[in-house]
Amino acid sequence: MPTSAKPSAETDSASAGSRPAGAVTDRLVRANTHYAEEFTDPGMDARPVLQVAVVACMDARLDLHAALGLELGDCHTIRNAGGVVTDDVIRSLTISQRALGTRSIVLIHHTNCGLESITEEFRQELEHEVGQRPVWAVEAYKDADQDVRQSMQRVRTSPFLLHKDDIRGFVFDVTTGLLREITPAS
């Protein structure tokens, strides 16, 4: 299946503004049909083989499995805008550890993140546009290294997590593909 980074004839024929509703979803459903034709049940359960949970940004440039040498079933992957540790991430990590056996946590932000170019004013703009302010914080930041440190601290101080001895944070460089480890705040 071609990626959006390399347009297919199907995506070339319609620009994003004129694409009929559902066209992308229809493409994904067709791809799933082809996938299912050769799919075999891998016989796994939900417990990750490597007992690790990875929290990362949702950015489409991050192919986490390839970048980290992971296979299906190796880890739990939790993604959101910025890869920041929010209450919902703590919820997922807690379930991952307490119900599904993970012990290690890897946090990954990246260079040139969209959260570096917006501010918390985004919430006020949404409120003016739709008439309701979101209850969630944008979690925008200017310094990826510092935000990784903050995310590491949020994990370390959560009373809900059992295993806090293997928490590491990184910034992924979107131009080189390399991870740079971030030293936690002392």
Image (cartoon, rainbow, N blue to C red):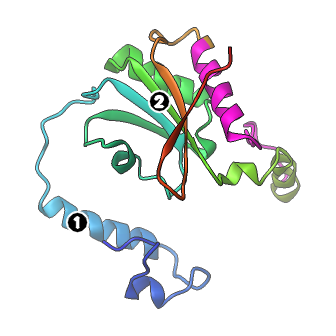
Residue at the image point whose x is 13% and y is 41% from the top: 42
In the picture provided, is 27 more to the left or to the right than 15?
Answer: left
CB of mark 2 within 8 Å of CB of mark 1? no
Q: Is residue 163 above or below residue 129?
A: above
Tell me, for residue 106, which label it has, or none. Answer: 2
Give coordinates of residue 154: x percent, y percent: 64, 20
Quadrant including the C terminus: top right
Residue at the image point whose x is 76% and y is 54% from the top: 117
How far is mark 2 from mark 1, CA to CA? 33 Å
Tell me, for residue 33, which label it has, or none. Answer: 1
Which stretch is magenta?
Answer: 131-156
Give coordinates of residue 151: x percent, y percent: 63, 27
Residue 133 part of the magenta-drawn span = yes
Q: Amino acid at mark 1?
A: Thr
User: Which secondary structure lies at badge 1?
Assistant: helix
- Number of other residues with Cα within 10 Å of mark 1, as a class: few under 14, some 14 to 19, many 20 or more: few
Quadrant including the N terminus: bottom left
Sequence-wise, the earlier of marks 2 and 1 is 1
Residue 126 part of the magenta-drawn span = no
Farthest residue to the bottom: give it. Answer: 13
Q: Amino acid at mark 2?
A: Val
Seen from the viewer's position, the closer of residues 36 and 8 is 8
Residue at the image point whose x is 58% and y is 19% from the top: 155
Residue at the image point whose x is 53% and y is 11% from the top: 160
Q: Is residue 37 above or below residue 78?
A: below
